[in-house]
């Protein structure tokens, strides 16, 4: 369930594995891949969630220390192993290339985020859409994968790509401008001008849309939180 807080053990049980030690796990499940991310200050990789709340930039992984490299952070992240086999970086990149060349659907990725030691949050499923291989601030090349949230039904661990739905939560700028003008830049319930939010009158989770001015309004933080997902 999206945004559910779970333990490490529960996360492993969901994926039917004893341990999840790698951050990148291509096709860990026959229907999808799994990544583990973190935005903590001490996180080993630079993962980001964009302001839109739907898009993740996930950094690829370094060459393993067991390969005899004292400082993996000084080496370009590898696409292939010494024997030519694709690394996890390579497998993810190859799936994107196949998707872009119309050879396959976008890879589905289940994302878990580490919040604290032993505490994780399942962020749901994402489509793997793009990647960049570019220099970081230290001058070495790293992979940066772009994933976009998607909605669909997962039944008995079987995914039907025909059930994939387009993303509709982002409110377009033109709608926001019209709503701001219409509502006078204040909460429609109490007139507050502080801590305002653009709110879906009919929540997205209940079938509401983001592209109609008639379904978007301005609420203050207090009324926005009080409403939650209830239909008023």
Image (cartoon, grey):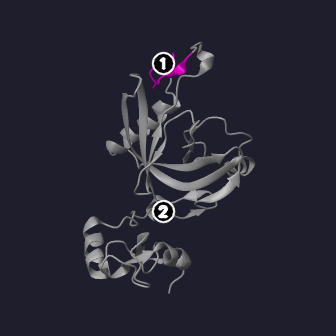
Q: Residue 29's mark?
A: none
Looking at the image, which is closer to me, 173 or 131? 173
Please tell me whether residue 221 is drawn above or below residue 96 in the rendered image: below
Q: Residue 74's mark?
A: 1
Mark 2 vs mark 1: give the one in front: 1
Q: Position of residue 78 (x, y in %)?
A: 47, 23
Q: Position of residue 3 (x, y in %)?
A: 59, 59
The magenta stretch is 71-84
Label 2 to label 1, Cα distance in Å? 38 Å
Residue 67 is a magenta residue? no
Please tell me whether residue 150 is drawn above or below residue 140 in the rendered image: below
Q: Residue at x 66, y 46 (%)?
A: 116
Q: Position of residue 6 (x, y in %)?
A: 69, 54
* Cβ–Cβ under 8 Å for marks 2 and 1: no
Of label 2 and label 1, which has the lower sequence position?
1
Please tell me whether residue 151 is drawn above or below residue 72 in the rendered image: below
Helix, strand or loop status at disc 2: loop
Q: Would you name the residue on which mark 2 appears?
A: 151
Asked whether residue 102 is in view, the answer is yes
Please tell me whether residue 121 is drawn above or below residue 131 in the rendered image: below
Helix, strand or loop status at disc 1: helix
Residue 75 is a magenta residue? yes
| Residue 212 in which image quadrant | bottom left
- Mark 1 residue crowding within 10 angstroms, few (<14) / some (14–19) / many (20+): some
| Residue 26 in which image quadrant | top right
Looking at the image, which is closer to me, 189 or 114? 189
Question: Taking 122 as reference, is 140 left or right?
Answer: left
Q: Position of residue 29 (x, y in %)?
A: 60, 46
| Residue 181 in which image quadrant | bottom left
Looking at the image, which is closer to me, 201 or 35? 201
């Amino acid at each position: 369930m999206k945004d559910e807080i779970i333990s490490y053990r529960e996360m492993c049980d969901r994926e039917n594995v004893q341990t999840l030690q790698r951050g990148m796990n291509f096709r860990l499940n026959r229907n999808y891949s799994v990544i583990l991310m973190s935005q903590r200050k001490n996180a080993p990789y630079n993962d980001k969630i964009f302001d839109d709340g739907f898009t993740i930039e996930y950094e690829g992984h370094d060459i393993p220390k067991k390969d005899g490299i004292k400082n993996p952070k000084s080496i370009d992240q590898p696409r292939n192993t010494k024997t030519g086999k694709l690394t996890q970086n390579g497998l993810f990149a190859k799936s994107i290339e196949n998707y872009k060349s119309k050879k396959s659907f976008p890879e589905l990725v289940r994302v878990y985020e580490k919040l604290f030691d032993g505490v994780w949050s399942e962020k749901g499923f994402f489509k793997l859409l793009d990647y960049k291989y570019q220099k970081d601030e230290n001058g070495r090349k790293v992979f940066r994968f772009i994933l976009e949230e998607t909605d669909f039904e997962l039944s008995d661990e079987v995914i039907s790509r025909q059930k994939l739905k387009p993303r509709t939560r982002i409110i377009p700028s033109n709608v926001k401008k019209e709503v701001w003008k219409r509502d006078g830049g204040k909460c429609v319930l109490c007139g507050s001008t502080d801590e305002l939010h653009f709110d879906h009158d009919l929540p997205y989770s209940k079938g509401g849309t983001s592209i109609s001015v008639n379904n978007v309004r301005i609420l203050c933080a207090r009324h926005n939180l009080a409403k939650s997902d209830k239909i008023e």
